[in-house]
Amino acid sequence: MTKRAVLLANLGSPDAPVTPAVRRYLHQFLMDPYVIQLPWPLRKAIVSLFVLPTRPKASAEAYQSVWMEQGSPLIVLSEKLKAALKAKVDLPVEMAMRYGNPSIEEKILTLTADKDITELLYIPLYPHFADSTVTTSVEEAKRVIKKHSLDIQLRTVEPFYDNPDYIEALVKSAEPYLEQDYDHIVFSYHGLPESHITKLDATGEHCLKQQNCCQLHNPEVHKTCYRHQVMRTTQCFALQAGLAENRYSVAFQSRLGRAKWLGPNTEDRLQELAQAGAKKVLVICPAFVTDCLETLEEIAIRGEEVFKQAGGHSLSLIPCMNDHPAWVDVLADWCQQ
């Protein structure tokens, strides 16, 4: 008889908002070949010479501005989600982080300490596919299972960017903000280097080769195309929420390094909106299901400053779904299926 356990997985966070802890975290994160997709010597040189000497201090200060009494926002809110899900399902449930603590290895070993567990339902908490999120997370789970010769079947929830239940939960979580008076909504997604997109296009002729590539029908390419998937999420959300086309737009945040990234950049978009006369904007970040540094500091603090300096009056961050009951219900249904 199959006995299932559930492991939720998110990106991760440093153990403390101080430079040494952030340096350790960034080193682990950026040395992942799925994140900086360059040969090891080049990756090592970039991380050691250009990132780690300065970025940890600045990132530590950013973390300090949003750190909670109980710890990192991502960890604290993820644990709340885990607790809410455990209350809904009669299954063992754990939460792990791809980088930092608690690790995927630690939590898989915790769950499989029960020798009756024969199946692990693995839920990477990323709605959209990218090698730097989904692939590296799944490969780490496989590595741990192989390393410890665990006799369990790994079942992975695929990216759920246009899953109707996910879209409905996302809209429900945003409803209190959509009912407010606002001029424009920015859908701000985590950015990716364009090379991450084109590398996965087996045809070499579709992704970013045509202006409307994400709208052209190509299921095989779109299965691993992050840009197509975030555009699809936006389209589904707008349709479900009844948004007028001229009241929302898509942008990408969190650029790092000199490579060409997906655009437009979120801060540039906020400046443009303010300069065009928008006074009240909403920003929603559907690439994240849990609030974290990228939403609470990059958007709610720095993004608001950029918008106001350009002439805007107020920017409201629509919180991530976190442990919203509608989202917990969706996860519970997936666990039981």
Image (cartoon, rainbow, N blue to C red):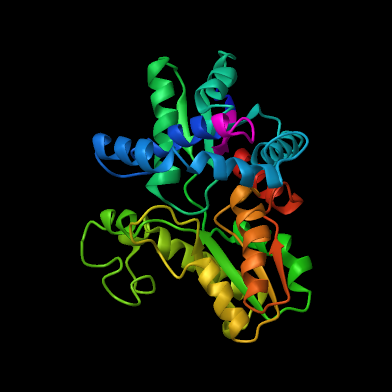
The answer to whether one can see residue 92 in this image is yes
Vertical relation: 147 (above or below) 159: above
Vertical relation: 322 (above or below) 100: below
Give me the residue at 67% from left, 38% from top. Answer: 72
Residue 177 is situated, as x and y percent measured from the top left of the image, at: 75, 68
Q: Quadrant of residue 125?
A: top right
Farthest residue, direction left = 204
Give me the residue at 60% from left, 44% from top. Answer: 334
Give me the residue at 52% from left, 60% from top. Answer: 189
Q: In which quarter of the image is residue 145?
A: top left
Residue 185 is situated, as x and y percent measured from the top left of the image, at: 63, 74
The answer to whether one can see residue 34 in this image is no
Give me the residue at 45% from left, 58% from top. Answer: 191
The residue closer to the viewer here, 270 or 62, is: 62
In this picture, residue 118 sits left or right of residue 75: left
The residue closer to the viewer here, 313 or 136, is: 313
17 falls in the magenta region: yes
The residue closer to the viewer here, 3 or 73, is: 73
Residue 178 is situated, as x and y percent measured from the top left of the image, at: 73, 72
The residue closer to the viewer here, 206 or 299, is: 299
Image: magenta residue range: 5-21
Vertical relation: 262 (above or below) 6: below
Residue 279 is situated, as x and y percent measured from the top left of the image, at: 70, 80
- Count of numbered circles in the view: 0
Q: Quadrant of the N terminus?
A: top right
224 falls in the magenta region: no
In this picture, residue 210 sits left or right of residue 303: left
